[in-house]
Amino acid sequence: MTQPRHASPLERTPARFNVHTSSDVRAMLEIMGLDSVEQLFADAPAAVVLGRDLELPPALSEWELVRPIV
């Protein structure tokens, strides 16, 4: 008799990271009556705007992210 296969944490956990497609973004902007993401943040005070890209390491896949704890 074979042992039951136990699902890995990735198989037991629903997807947590959703990527918005360009059509998703356009639809959200349309609902808000905006033409661009920049327009969404146009009223943010200059004091809270970073003004440059974040210096982040390359993105990891979900598997690369959870592999050390699996």
Image (tube, rainbow, N blue to C red):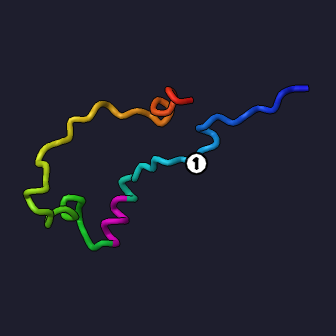
Q: Can you tell which quarter of the image residue 7 is in?
A: top right
Q: Nearer the viewer, residue 13 or 20?
A: 13
Q: What element carries label 1?
A: loop
Residue 41 % position (x, y): 19, 62
Quarter occupied by the C terminus: top right
**Quarter of the N terminus within the rendering:** top right
- Please, what is the three-letter code of the amino acid marked with disc 1? Pro
Q: From the viewer's perspective, is 9 left or right of 30? A: right
Q: Please tell me which residue is depicted at 46% across the width and 29% down the height of the picture.
A: 64
Residue on which disc 1 sits: 14
Our reading of the magenta stretch's main secondary structure is: helix
Q: In this view, does 17 lie above or below 25?
A: above
Residue 3 among magenta residues: no
State left or right for residue 50 relative to residue 10. Answer: left
The residue range painted magenta reads 25-31
Residue beneath the point at 52% across and 30% down? 69
Residue lying furthest front? 69
Residue beneath the point at 64% across and 43% down: 12
Q: Is residue 56 left or right of residue 15?
A: left
Q: In this view, does 23 lie above or below 13?
A: below
Please state which of residues 57 and 31 is positioned toward the viewer in this rendering: 57
